[in-house]
Image (cartoon, helix red, strand yellow):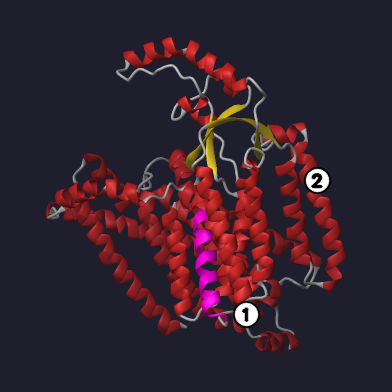
């Protein structure tokens, strides 16, 4: 983990040499540590089954390792002093970073031990309610007249969410929420001895199973440390006990050591060059900390790993070896399927535009503010657009493939329905930005609504409508390739078929054709939009 500290410190030094604010990095490190202390997992503790693994935060480890409280104290002091900047802020950041580093390393050197789980019931429900209240209040706070109503609505919503989640029906819908946040506490006296005896008593049966599948036999243990790398007995896990192995890390550990590097490197640079600070350091530093603490769980959840890419490199080389040279014998079939793909995009875009044009007028705020009925129509139309845009084209394609069978018709339906909302949204925004002068002039002479649209609005938005439709056609062509992978016809279906049979030298012909057609459509569409707008 020290490599992440070196990365953070090196980044801080490079930014310092580029005259970037060091106080910003010190604040980011301090705020990030405070967030990490309560929210990001710092380690893993295991039970009998893999699903019983718990990943506590630094705060979760606090009952069995009280020294972790010094990390929170150091981060808070560093944040307060760093706001002053200069050398005193750099010294505080450096001290807090080194303190955290020493505590984190000392934790990793601790032996394996046993702990009890202590779920904090109601905590996540309360946090969710408070977050909802904060969002409503934050949105309404910028409008003086809306502050009090926003506060009341926020409190009511937060309270409703809290009691809803803690109710029986709420727990049935979200079964993992109650007691989701857990602390680790010390075990009662004699627990370790009991678990050791339970493990040793079941060792004969365990070794019999391991012998049958060719695994090494296990020896009896005399201390809990002997369970390192193993699992505790089922009865102990069901009773709420977990095996704490300090050398087992989580993604929060990575964030902690990276933030330590920012604090140490930023502190050193601030001591050397105390003028490296900016007025907006508090806001930008806090934003940087939030970004780091948000992106890291996202990378962890997606199993992002360069090691896995390296491990898969031989397959990529084998794919390229089997795909080259291209088999030109598949060119005729590729051309036929490519034409179907273009036609799917063309028909889907046309149908979407036909329905989106009239709907866009109903979704334009400047044309529907006249009476309550039209405002209701505006709300319903915008609501339909948002609902339609929320359902991905691929999901619609899967539904229509099941409904109408394999083939391009399912792709056309999915693309047309989804594109109605996308085109309707940009059409309506174009209408909302038209010049009102011609509209008011025609209304002043008593022109009807259709004449106002025909002579005042369409001449202004017509070129924009065509440009947006061409742009949507470009997108739909790319989407239609993916739709083919789920049976909606076209070149995507051809690629899936050749990928499944391992005829990569035919599939590469389709990939090269896609690259060629995408470029042709892109340049042609860009040229047309440039002539129209």
Q: Please check the rendered image and state whether residue 487 is part of the magenta-colored stretch, yes or no.
A: no
Name the residue rendered at 62%, 51% in the picture: 37
92 left or right of 347?
right
Residue 72 point in image, percent of width and height: 66, 54
124 left or right of 470?
right
Q: How many marks?
A: 2
Name the residue rendered at 21%, 52% in the picture: 333
- 84 is higher (above) or lower (below) than 422: below
Q: Which mark lies nearer to you, 1 or 2?
A: 2
Let me know if residue 358 appears in the view: no
* Mark 1 neighbour density, 10 Å: few (under 14) some (14–19) many (20 or more): few
Residue 313 point in image, percent of width and height: 25, 49
304 left or right of 425?
left
For residue 390, the mark is none
What's the magenta region? 255-274
Residue 117 point in image, percent of width and height: 64, 31
Secondary structure beneath disc 2?
helix
Quarter holding residue 487: top left
Quarter holding residue 440: bottom right
User: Is tag 1's residue or tag 2's residue first in the polypeptide sequence?
Assistant: 2
* Viewer-side residue, 311 vs 461: 311
**Residue occupied by mark 2:** 160
Secondary structure mostly seen in magenta is: helix
* Mark 2 neighbour density, 10 Å: few (under 14) some (14–19) many (20 or more): few
Question: What is the spatial separation of the Cα atoms under label 1 and label 2, in whole angstroms?
Answer: 40 Å
Secondary structure beneath disc 1?
loop
- 363 is higher (above) or lower (below) than 329: below
Let me know if residue 362 appears in the view: yes
**Residue occupied by mark 1:** 433
* Viewer-side residue, 469 vs 99: 99
Name the residue rendered at 34%, 60% in the picture: 342
């Amino acid at each position: 983990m020290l490599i992440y500290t070196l990365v953070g410190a090196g980044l801080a030094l490079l930014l310092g040499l580029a005259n970037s604010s060091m106080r910003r990095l010190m604040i980011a490190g301090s705020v990030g540590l405070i967030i990490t202390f309560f929210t990001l997992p710092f380690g893993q503790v295991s039970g009998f089954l893999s699903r019983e693994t718990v990943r506590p935060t630094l705060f979760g480890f606090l009952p069995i390792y009280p020294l972790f409280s010094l990390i929170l104290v150091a981060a808070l002091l560093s944040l307060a002093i760093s706001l002053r900047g200069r050398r005193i802020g750099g010294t505080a950041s450096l001290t807090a970073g080194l303190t955290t580093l020493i505590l984190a390393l000392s934790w990793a050197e601790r032996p394996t031990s046993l702990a009890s789980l202590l779920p904090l019931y109601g905590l996540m429900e309360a946090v969710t309610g408070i977050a909802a209240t904060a969002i409503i209040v934050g949105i309404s706070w910028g409008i003086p007249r809306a502050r009090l109503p926003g506060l009341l609505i926020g409190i009511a919503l937060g309270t409703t969410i809290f009691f809803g989640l803690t109710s029986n029906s709420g727990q049935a819908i979200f079964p993992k929420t109650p007691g989701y946040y857990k602390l680790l506490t010390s075990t009662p006296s004699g627990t370790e001895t009991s678990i050791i005896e339970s493990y040793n008593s079941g060792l004969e049966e365990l070794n019999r199973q391991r012998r049958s599948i060719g695994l090494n036999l296990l020896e009896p243990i005399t201390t809990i440390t002997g369970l390192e790398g193993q699992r505790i007995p089922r009865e102990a896990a069901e009773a709420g006990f977990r095996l704490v192995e300090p050398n087992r890390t989580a993604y929060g550990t990575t964030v902690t050591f990276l933030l330590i590097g920012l604090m140490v490197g930023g502190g050193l640079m601030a001591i050397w060059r105390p003028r490296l600070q900016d007025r907006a350091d508090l806001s930008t530093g806090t934003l940087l900390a939030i970004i780091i603490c948000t992106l890291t769980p996202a990378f962890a959840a997606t199993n992002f790993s360069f090691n896995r890419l390296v491990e898969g490199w031989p397959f990529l080389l084998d794919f390229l070896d089997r795909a080259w040279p291209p088999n030109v014998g598949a060119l005729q079939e590729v051309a036929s399927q490519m034409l179907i793909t273009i036609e799917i995009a063309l028909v889907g875009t046309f149908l979407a535009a036909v329905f989106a044009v009239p709907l866009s007028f109903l979704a334009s705020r400047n044309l529907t503010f006249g009476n309550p009925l039209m405002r209701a129509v505006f709300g319903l139309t915008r609501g339909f657009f948002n609902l339609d845009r929320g359902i991905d084209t691929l999901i619609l394609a899967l539904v229509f493939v099941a409904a109408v069978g394999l083939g391009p018709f399912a792709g056309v339906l999915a693309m047309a329905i989804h594109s109605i909302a996308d085109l309707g949204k940009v059409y309506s925004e174009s209408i909302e930005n038209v010049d009102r002068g011609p509209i008011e002039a025609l209304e002043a002479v008593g022109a009807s609504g259709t004449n106002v649209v025909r002579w005042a609005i369409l001449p202004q938005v017509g070129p924009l409508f065509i440009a947006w439709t061409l742009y949507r056609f470009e997108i739909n062509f790319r989407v239609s390739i993916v739709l083919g992978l789920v049976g909606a016809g076209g070149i995507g279906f051809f690629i899936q078929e050749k990928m499944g049979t391992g005829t990569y030298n035919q599939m590469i012909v389709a990939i090269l054709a896609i690259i060629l057609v995408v470029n042709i459509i892109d340049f042609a569409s860009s040229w047309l939009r440039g002539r129209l707008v």
